[in-house]
Amino acid sequence: MTVSIISENGIAVVTIDNPPVNALSQALRQALVEAVAKLDADAAVKAVVLICAGRTFIAGADVSEFGKPPQPPHLPDVVATIEGARKPWVAAIHGSALGGGLEVALGCAWRVAVASASLGLPEVKLGIIPGAGGTVRLPRLIGPAAAVELVTSGSPVDAKKAEGLGLVDAVIEGDLLAGAIAFANGAAGKTRPEPISSRAVAPVEAGFWEGAEKAVAAKAKREAAPLRALASVRRASETDFASAMAFERETFLDLRGSQQASALRHVFFAERAAPRPPELAGITPRDIRSAAVIGGGTMGAGIAAALRDAGLPVILIERDAAAVERGLANVRAIYDGSVKRGRMTQAIADARMAGVTDSGDYGLLADTDLIIEAVFEDLSVKRAVFEKLSVVCRPDAVLATNTSYLDPDAIGEGIAHPERFLGLHFFSPAHIMKLLEIVPTGTTAPDVLVTGFALARLLGKIPVRAGICDGFIGNRILKVTRAQAERLLLSGATPAAVDAAMRAFGLPMGPFEAQDLGGLDIAAFQRKAARERGEMPFAPVADRLCALKRYGQKTGGGWYDYQPGDRAPKLSDTVAAIIAEAAESRAQRAWDEAGIVDAILLPMVNEATCILEEHVALRAADIDLVKIHGYGFPRWRGGPMHYAEGRGLSEVVAVLDRLAADGLAEPPSDGLRRAAKAGGFSVLAG
Ligand code: 3HC
Ligand code: NAI
């Protein structure tokens, strides 16, 4: 049963039980309308408490229904029915009251919440706006400025803050149900507050809406929903309730069917599916209560901070006393930065640092559950580390390497109990970037693999399983991105035009700006190794830049020139001359933005298709998550694979065929052609 009702001493308790998150399915909406009718007709009932079973209050509309035609009763009518009920309703909130959940609560006469609850309207994060009065009732309850903030950011507030805003009437200490019943009993005798829909909106200062529009537009960039949400709050503040509701509903329905909303829903479900891959269902992970990191450089320090942020005690091992000091200083610098940016208090930062034990002594690792190696990218250095770990660690301790390009099978050769070894590929900065590629070797035991996923959950990261190949999923595709970017240069595009086109597509940075920021030397090192293996990586311009030690911002020049102390890229005559030299007698053409994006993105999709076919990635959605969470691919585009499917895979094949005919890309893979015939990537998934 979705909704149950118990009445005692004049208070009816309506309990929603619709796991996992009490989302407002059609059945639940229907049951709520029926509950209102039933309780309205019950003379013994003075007031109603609306509470939810399980982990949360109503977390919103049922997102899985968004792709289908809306079924009655529609949520705005459900909220209106509750608001118009003869008996006053009290929403008793725990967990999250989000989206439609908060809108239902706004239909209630009062809202009470436990201190740990959070309340918000996250719809813009799904590419839509609230569709059941959120933008209309909220400014009437808490004023336009606070409403604009909540609605356009999509970020929730905690119960205390909500109380301060007037969104919650009381924060309940102790048992929520008992507290809510007591509140309802107390309230039943008092005058019922005016329904929110009948209230007036507080006036705003002159210029308020124009200022808000500028701020929201600057943050949203090309995402449509935040500005549309703002327009809806504005309309709600400037017209009567009924017209504002009609405007909100129209906007909601319009956005619900939009490409951006479909992409954001795809990412929403992919993110939730990622931590629990079906092929690993039922396998119990190993306990991780303590961790160690070997190597306290850029990655090791970030990984140590990520582990500390998740509450694990961390041992940080370095080569010698001086390196130990540097490693610890690297971790401290991360926390100093967090304090400076107001992300955490000094006291919390101090506590996090206090949980890091720094040492050169491997003997300390005898009872550590998880050890992550992040030393130099050098096979013999890494092997030497694992040789020591094999001796000192418990046989069931999980051992991981953070290698970017080396073969984990080769690193793991000779490890005692090789079933406990795997790759855990973090992204820089490791305490911030959400992606974690989990790389099983030929010997990794299933429970160790599952432990990788459990660790990701603990760290708040998005785990994606990746098979062994050069660069795993993300860096393998990145190589294609860079090669394509260079092909464009040799055929008439400039670095500035390529970067501008990719930014316009929605990436935070173009491929050349990104290389200048990260440094060209790392990729040059990879190419050298690849050439030693007999491969022929394509980077004619980057190779020339590196020969001149133009490694990027850190050397005052890379793809662009930089003035000392200034990160702003300046066009470089030197680079233009190098490109001209590398282009030799190649055919030149005029590139527009769309052409540039196609020439970079569609070959990435082609490579990703090979990755799927080889089962290096198991699902197209996993590749989308890798690009979104590791490389800044715009979320609202849904990732490259979702984008390609939306574009139509036959068209993707046709564009690639044309590029290949001109020598500007590899031809479409057989897998891509098959996927195009089948109308989607699912034919290739492992
Ligand atoms: N609709 C359908 N399914 C949902 C859902 C929703 N709104 N919210 C969560 N789920 C599902 C997840 O897909 C997942 O399913 P699975 O177990 O099969 O993988 C399951 O519920 C649990 O979700 P989480 O793993 O995210 O659980 P957590 O406990 O970590 O988090 C939560 C709970 C904070 C409620 C989180 O799920 C969340 O933020 N949900 C989204 C809330 C949201 O965006 N609501 C607004 C919807 S739009 C709307 O309401 C429009 C309205 O204005 C008309
Ligand atoms: P780094 O050079 O900043 O740090 C390496 C650290 O390891 C140094 O502090 C060094 O003193 C220490 N070290 C070397 N040998 C050691 C040993 N035998 N015992 C203990 N400590 C030792 O390198 P970075 O960038 O942190 O990379 C580390 C690993 O992470 C590499 O395998 C790299 O490929 C990988 N990686 C790097 C990413 C990046 O963006 N920098 C991203 C993802 C993975």
Image: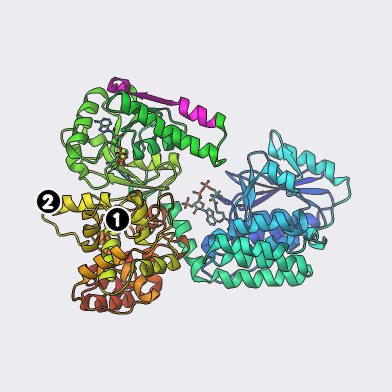
| Predominant secondary structure, magenta span | helix
Measured as percent of width and height from the top left, residue 538 is found at: 20, 62
The crowding category of the residue bearing disc 1, from other C-alpha atoms within 10 Å (few below 14, some 14 to 19, many at least 20), is many
Extent of the magenta region: 348-366
Ligand 2 near label 1 (Cβ, under 8 Å)?
A: no
Residue located 57% across and 34% down the image? 345
How does the figure colour the protein chain or chains? rainbow
Q: Amino acid at mark 2?
A: Glu
Residue 435 in the image: state x and y as whole percent.
39, 49
Percent position of residue 234, x then y:
71, 66
* Residue kind at label 1, given as amino acid type: Ala
- Is 599 on the left-hand or right-hand side of 378? right
- In front: label 2 or label 1: 2
Residue at point 22% right, 61% down? Answer: 539
Which circle marks residue 260 in the picture? none
Lateral position of residue 221 relative to residue 394, left or right: right
Relative vertical location of residue 349 with respect to residue 565 in this rendering, above or below: above
Q: CA distance from mark 2 to mark 1?
A: 27 Å
Q: Quadrant of the C terminus?
A: bottom left
Q: Earlier in the sequence, mark 2 or mark 1?
A: 2
Q: Is residue 527 magenta?
A: no
Residue under the point 51% across and 61% down: 64
- The residue that label 2 is drawn on is 532
Residue 140 percent location from the top left of the image: 77, 59
Q: Considering depth in this image, is 445 or 340 the residue closer to the camera?
A: 340
What number is the disc on residue 617? Answer: 1
Between 402 and 514, the one nearer to me in the picture: 514
Q: Nearer the viewer, residue 606 or 631?
A: 631
Would you place residue 167 above or below residue 290 in this image?
below
Give the crowd class for mark 2: few <14, some 14-19, many >=20 residues within 10 Å. Answer: few
Q: Could you say which quadrant of the image residue 559 lies in? A: bottom left
